[in-house]
Amino acid sequence: DAGITQSPRHKVTETGTPVTLRCHQTENHRYMYWYRQDPGHGLRLIHYSYGVKDTDKGEVSDGYSVSRSKTEDFLLTLESATSSQTSVYFCAISEVMGQETQYFGPGTRLLVL
Amino acid sequence: GENVEQHPSTLSVQEGDSAVIKCTYSDSASNYFPWYKQELGKRPQLIIDIRSNVGEKKDQRIAVTLNKTAKHFSLHITETQPEDSAVYFCAAESGGSYIPTFGRGTSLIVHP
């Protein structure tokens, strides 16, 4: 597996609280992505980053923000968690953008009560 | 934007049979089509990919075919084994966005 870690791996939180998920890579890849995975929906892109402090929205970005202050770290923040954000969150990295393999992290299982 | 449809959502086969998963895409500019395998509780991992200048690609028991005219591509697994049981995702990537759009996944169950 590529050098990607996610923390925490599991989290239970309450509606309305802020939550931050961390993705850390040791591959020095430029591109990083956050996806959420829900039954029947596959993998849907939340946000992605194409460099330090360079980020853009994906198809399901509402309610989420991201930050990337270092090449190796990409943070996903749920400003005020809702039950609809209960999901498994995967971080991914790629060396180039386009026509290249994405390497996924182990995932974070988030439950919002 | 790109739209990827994947069928079937569930596929059950006997060990040794072949399995075929089909995907269609909407953006004629899409030119990269990866397939990912996700075992239960694990991360998705690339198993094979194909680019638009190629019609077919094989890697041992798995193969992918691409029909650009019809805008569909398929994953073929021959001589299935129980360890092939997993969820398989197709994806299509447009040359304009460089971001893959994923299908909803196919749960493949191989019965011993």
Image (cartoon, rainbow, N blue to C red):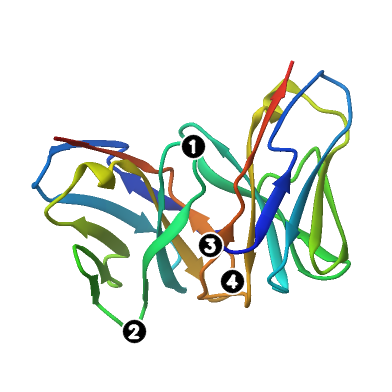
Q: Which residue is mark 4?
A: B98
Q: Nearer the viewer, residue A111 or B41?
A: B41
Is any atom of residue B28 visible in this view? no
Q: Is residue A10 left or right of residue B69?
A: right
Residue pointed to by mark 1: B41
Of the residues under marks 4 and 2, which one precedes in the sequence? Answer: 2
The C terminus of chain B lies in quadrant: top left
Q: Quadrant of residue A30?
A: bottom right
Q: Tell which tag, 1 or 3, sits nearer the viewer.
A: 1
Label 4 marks which chain's residue? B
| Callout 3 amino acid | Pro
Q: Residue at x 74, y 46 (%)?
A: A61
Q: Position of residue A7 (x, y in %)?
A: 75, 43
The residue under label 4 is which amino acid type? Answer: Tyr
Report whether mark 1 lies on the same chain as mark 4: yes
Crowdedness near tag 3: few (<14), some (14–19) or many (≥20) residues, C-alpha within 10 Å: many
Q: What whole-number distance in Å separates the C-alpha atoms at marks 3 and 2?
A: 18 Å
Q: Chain of mark 1?
A: B
Residue under numbered circle 2: B53
Q: Which residue position is annotated with label 3?
A: B100
